[in-house]
Amino acid sequence: MPVRRTTLWAGATLLLCGGLWWAWAAQAPGARAAVRLSPAAAQEATTVGARPAPPNAVDALQPDPTRSQRGVAQVRQALFERGSLRGVQPDGGFRLDAQGRLIPDRAVRRRFDQLLTTLGEASIEELGALLQQQARAELGGDDGAAQVMAVWERYLQLQRQLAPAGGTSSPPTADSLTLALQERARQRRLVLGNDWAEAFYGDEEAALQARLSSEAEAAASPAPGRDSQATTLPSVARAPQPGEDLAALQRQREATLGPEAAARLQALDQAQAAWAQKVTEARSQVTRLQGAAELSAVQRQQAIDQLIESRFAPQDRLRARAVLGLAPVGG
């Protein structure tokens, strides 16, 4: 296989698994420790409870209430003065719009990824506390910081879901990578929301799709008599259209893509439908509350806030408020 194509497959696999974080996590634990931890930092991490990341990188993303935590100042010193970020400024940043809403921006993901590369030197709880302090200082208040942390929690949720499942039994092809790209794109938008997924991954997804299409065309053109449609992903991988026969679509997926891929796509369909239904029901109730003349402005806002809290999980509330056109709490 040409070097260029091998590089494409490797790069595509890392992108589909989530990007920079999984590139770090794919390294051997010993190699990670050698690169990331100075002897002093390693000793400090062990003595205070921030032990190096386990071989299963997903475990490093899970909170551990039994582990002792350092203060933010200690963590900042361990990372930016003695650790792997020594001499490095925090990457990326945060911006608010005129209404005080956090602007979806790739720079936010750059900050997240920079912190995640230090897992092992600091626990996920310590990194969250450091991020919150950074956001509060850069945005000038708790409201902006709360919005950053809401996106951070969804980003961590996405990283856990996109963890590599292990080696594949056969080399990837243009078809399998294109299907994986579509699945990942839909999953990112389900977890992060359209605006944040596009800001975080849109350029990478478009570039990878263009390269996959180019590779497919190049592979098909030299071979006389080859079916050029073999490198074109069937349309059944898309999200279902309103009113479409879902059972028929699923049968087509199974026949075209196989039962495992069809099952993954069906799970995404169901999750997206459940979210859309939840938003639709909440929008109807918000509209009713906004028009309730018997309520004062304060009572109306309290009722809407209670509705959001009862209908949506904590990590989904900021996204829900944005979709429903509601200002962040405290905004």
Image (spheres, helix red, strand yellow):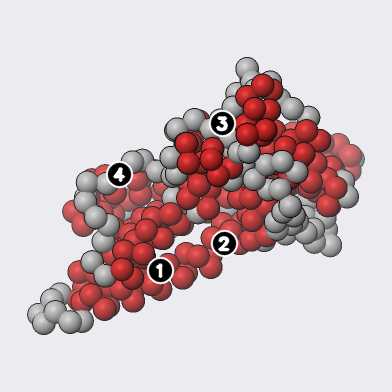
Circle nearer the N terminus (4, 1): 4
64 or 175: nearer the viewer: 64
Mark sitting on residue 198: 2
Residue 65 higher or lower than 126, as above or below: above
Secondary structure type for disc 1? helix
Mark 3 or mark 2, whichever is nearer to me: 3
| SS at badge 2 | helix
| Mark 4 lies on residue | 167
Instruction: Confirm whether residue 37 shows in the render.
Output: yes
User: Between tags 4 and 2, which lies in front?
Assistant: 4
Which residue is at 72% across, 37% downward? 78
Residue 143 x %, y %:
82, 45
Residue picked out by circle 1: 209
Q: Which mark is residue 52?
A: 3
Tag 3–tag 2 contact (CB < 8 Å) = no
Q: Residue furthest front?
A: 39
Q: CA distance from mark 4 to mark 3?
A: 24 Å
Q: Amino acid at mark 4?
A: Gly
Q: Who comes first in sequence, dot 3 or dot 2?
A: 3
Between label 4 and label 3, give the one nearer the viewer: 3
Viewer-side label of 2, 1: 1
Closer to the chain start, of discs 4 and 3, is 3
Could you give the CA–CA distance between mark 2 and mark 1, rounded to whole angstroms?
A: 14 Å
Question: Where is 160 relative to 8, above or below?
Answer: above
Q: Badge 3 local density, few (<14 within 10 Å), some, or many (20+)? A: many
**Amino acid type, callout 3:** Pro
